[in-house]
Every structure is written in C-alpha cells, then in structure tokens.
Image: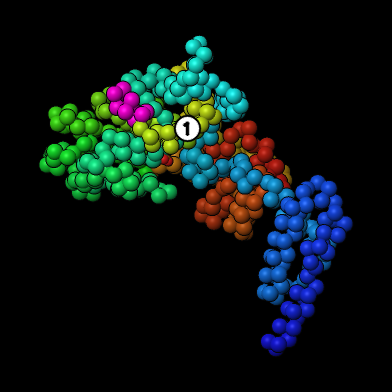
C-alpha cells in the first residue's frame, strides 16, 4: 500500500514541467510581453515549489494550462501592494489593526500635496534653512496654550525621548497602578529600562497616595511620571493621586512632572455624553512640565507622538539626538497640520472622522442600516437591523459603548461569510455577534457605502 502511494507520487512528480518548459507555454509567453523575464521566472519557480509540496501530500500534478493560470495569479499578487484600503464595518472607531484614526479629506489632500517638494525645512522669506518643527508647533500651542511643542514618530517614541533626555541614570517615580501595557509591546517599565531611567514603583495596584510619592523621593529623583490608564478602567476601591497634586509636589522639590496622556483629546468627551477623558488643555492647566499623547487616537490625525509643555524642556528635547531618529516625515506634518486646522476653525466635529463617528446618534445610523437591509433583501439576502453597541477602541475611553443599529446578515456559516468578505475587493471587516454576521455602519464612511454594497453583492 505504502509502496503504491510512493509510486504514484513519483509518477506525478515526474509530470511536473521544468521552468524552461513552462516558459514556452502560450499563456506564459503572453505574460512575458507584459512582465520582466526575471519576475515571471520567480513566479514560475514559486508555483512549481508549491505544486511539488502539494504532490508530496497526495495531489495529482495539474495540467500546464492550469499551472500557467497559477503563475498569472502569482504574478498579479507579486505586483499588488500588500497594504491597501479596507472597509471597517466593525464599529470600533480607533481600530489599531485597521490603522487607527481615518483621516479627514483635508488631511489626506494635504499629505498628497506635500509628497513632492515643500518648504519642510526652508524659510521662504529668508531664503535659507528653516526647521521642520515650526509647522505643527505653532498650531499646537495656539490650540492648547502650551508654551512649546514637538512632534515625533509616535507616543511611545515621545515617552522614550522624554525619559532619555531628562531622566537618564536618575529615578522616575510612578504609581504601581499606572505601570500599563498599551498593547503591541508598549510596556511602561520596559520603555523606562530602554531609556536608562530607573523606575521607582510606589503605592499598590489599586491605591496610590501623594505620600507614597513623597516617601520615595531621593536626591536621585528626576521626575514624577503620571500615565493615563487609557485602555482599562480601575473601579471600586481605588485611588490615583491627581496630576495637580503631583505637579505641586514636583515643584516643591525642583523635580519634573510629566504626564503620558495616551489619547490626547483636544475636546471634552463628557460634553457628548461619553465618560470623561482628560483633555490636553486640562492636563496642561495643572502646570505639568510636559504632556505627551498620540496623534492618531482621539486627536484623529496621522500617526505621531506630540509633546507639549515648558519651552526650556522642549528646547532640550529638540536638541537631543533621539529626536532626529524619531522625526516625522513631511507628509505626516502636513496631515497633522490639516487635522489641527479643523480644531482651530471649530469644525472638528464635522470634519474629523473620529469625532464625527464618536458623536453620531443612533438616529443617524439606523436609517442607513435600514437602507442597507432593504438593499440586501432586494438582492435576496435575509438581513435585519438589530440593536448593538459600537466601541471607541485604540486604548481610548475603555468600556465606553455607543448604542448603534447593526445590520445582521442571516447565514448558516457566519465565520465563512466573514472570511469571504475579508478576502473580497475591497475587503470588508465585520464582526460576529450571537452567531450572526453583523456590520456596524458607524465606522463606514458614507463615501464607502457603494463599495460596501458592491463587495457584498460579489460575495453573497
Ligand atoms: C496609546 C498609548 C501609548 C502609545 O502610543 P503610540 O502612539 O501608539 O506609540 C503610550 N501611552 C499611553 C498612555 C497610551 O494610551
């Protein structure tokens, strides 16, 4: 029996054509007119290697025509970028795996416009070298009343830079309740170790008082660090020392007080019926020396780490070699500026997609969901609008849920439908809830609805 199988495998393997033979196939000859010889040979080699593996696991050798078709598919996959747009129908607004904040149209345009030459580091009136730091700094200071600001690659980079430049070889005191892991490998203790600052943990997981910080002060203390527990909520018997108290203590002892805010909202979330997320101006108003946060969380801009606060300290950071290593590109600065301008113009709620989605009423979502259900029924697919919840995500406003109307598609195998939609064009990402496949239109831009319908039509 075993010998017979072995014999079949050997026979099928012998049928597998060589690269040279396949190159002579009419289908492949056509491909060679469009693609380079090298790329076509690469595709052929990869297809032959895969096919050999399949034969070894018991498959029959496919025909040359079939192999040519596989080479064509491989070629188009090789030439397709692996990063492309998807439709986020999960209802998670800041979905880290789907690129966090979707940018406003103005931000997208600004990024595209500056992707060629720009006055990035060129002082136009003076006709000489300028600084890339000026572009976002002025706007950030105007919006938050900070003395000075600096933009780096992301918030993790901002924390690393602050600790390295201002506390290396010295002690930084932090509450045990704030030794957070943000996800994706960002853990406060590890970033501290990387910076060369020494971590001094005080208090307990659930309660830390001002006197815990006070008792830990030594001549080596450089900084009191307050980290916003942005992705979880401590409820019940808990106490964190307010930032304002830390600032007072730091000032009394000539130390720095720094807050890692994480989300960095410029607007007060509480005025929209959401729970209160400390806003940047509020944090600065305590007199904190520096505050840092992400550009692509509640700010709704491109990936960036924003540091605001005392000018003398920002000047030290600007001169540090790490700042060069963590600097942002011209396109990011352009996208950030355009996003900040929405706030300056007072149009952030309408223009910044994150805020539009956050403040969208269920009355705005349900009619869109009902229309999609209607469209699906016309296409012969059973669907209904059911009540559910959207999430903020991205380590912002943990536990906060926003009532929404979900489009529930009634199929026997929801996981299979989810996969087919993920592999469609454009890919659609939904979620499974109570054994149904659901789409939440809160996170689907109105401009994406036609493409969503097309993707559903092609799949269902
Ligand atoms: C999200 C977050 C970070 C990491 O921000 P990135 O911009 O992703 O680097 C750091 N600290 C806190 C408190 C956060 O919430």
Q: Relative to residue 459, is residue 375 depicted above or below?
A: above
**Residue at position x 52%, y 13% in the image:** 127
* Residue range (magenta): 310-319
Rendered location of residue 344, percent (x, y): 45, 18
Rendered location of residue 416, percent (x, y): 62, 58
**Residue at position x 54%, y 56% in the image:** 435
Label tally: 1
Residue 176 as seen in the image, left or right of residue 403: left
- Residue 273 is at least partly visible in this image: no
Residue 17, located in which quarter of the rendered image? Answer: bottom right
Residue 249, located in which quarter of the rendered image? Answer: top left
Q: Quadrant of ligand 1?
A: top left
**Residue at position x 61%, y 54% in the image:** 419
- Residue 196 is at least partly visible in this image: yes
Looking at this rendering, what residue extends furthest in the top direction? 125
- The residue under label 1 is 328
Residue 299, located in which quarter of the rendered image? Answer: top left
| Magenta stretch, main secondary structure class | helix
**Which quarter of the image is occupied by the N terminus?**
bottom right
């Amino acid at each position: 029996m075993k010998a017979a199988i072995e014999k079949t495998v050997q026979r099928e393997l012998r049928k597998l054509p060589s690269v040279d033979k396949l190159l002579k196939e009419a289908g492949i000859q056509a491909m060679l007119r469009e693609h380079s010889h090298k790329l076509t040979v690469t595709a052929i080699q990869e297809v032959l290697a895969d096919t050999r593996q399949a034969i070894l696991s018991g498959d029959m050798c496919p025909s040359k025509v079939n192999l040519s078709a596989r080479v064509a598919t491989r070629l188009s996959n090789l030439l397709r970028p692996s990063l492309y747009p998807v439709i986020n129908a999960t209802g998670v607004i800041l979905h880290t795996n789907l690129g966090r904040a979707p940018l406003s149209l103005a931000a997208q345009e600004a990024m595209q416009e500056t992707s060629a030459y720009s006055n990035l580091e060129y002082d136009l009136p003076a006709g000489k070298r300028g600084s890339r730091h000026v572009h976002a700094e002025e706007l950030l200071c105007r919006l938050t009343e900070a003395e000075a600001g600096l933009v780096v690659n992301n918030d993790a980079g901002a924390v690393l830079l602050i600790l390295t430049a201002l506390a290396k070889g010295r002690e930084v005191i932090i509450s045990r309740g704030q030794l957070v892991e943000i996800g994706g490998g960002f853990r406060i203790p590890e970033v501290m170790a990387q910076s060369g600052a020494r971590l001094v943990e005080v208090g307990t997981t659930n309660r830390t008082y001002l006197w815990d910080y006070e008792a830990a002060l030594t001549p080596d203390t450089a900084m009191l660090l307050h980290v916003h527990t942005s992705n979880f909520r401590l409820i019940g018997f808990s106490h964190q020392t307010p930032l304002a108290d830390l600032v007072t203590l730091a000032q009394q002892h000539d130390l720095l007080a720094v807050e890692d805010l994480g989300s960095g909202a410029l607007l007060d979330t509480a005025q929209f019926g959401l729970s209160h997320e400390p806003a940047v101006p509020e944090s600065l108003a305590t007199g904190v020396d520096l505050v840092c946060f992400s550009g692509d969380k509640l700010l709704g801009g491109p990936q960036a780490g924003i540091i605001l606060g005392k000018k003398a300290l920002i000047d030290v950071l600007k001169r540090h070699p790490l700042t060069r290593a963590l600097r942002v590109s011209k396109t990011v600065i352009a996208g950030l500026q355009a996003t900040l301008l929405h706030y300056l113009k007072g149009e952030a709620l309408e223009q910044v997609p994150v805020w539009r989605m956050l403040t969208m009423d269920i009355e705005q979502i349900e009619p869109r969901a009902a229309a999609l259900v209607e469209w699906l029924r016309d296409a012969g697919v059973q669907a209904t609008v059911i009540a559910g919840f959207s999430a903020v995500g991205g380590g912002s406003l943990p536990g906060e849920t926003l009532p929404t109307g979900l489009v529930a598609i009634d199929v026997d195998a929801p996981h299979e439908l989810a996969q087919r939609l993920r592999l469609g064009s454009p890919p659609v990402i939904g979620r499974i809830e109570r054994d149904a496949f659901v789409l939440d239109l809160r996170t689907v831009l109105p401009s994406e609805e036609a493409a969503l319908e097309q993707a559903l039509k092609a799949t269902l």
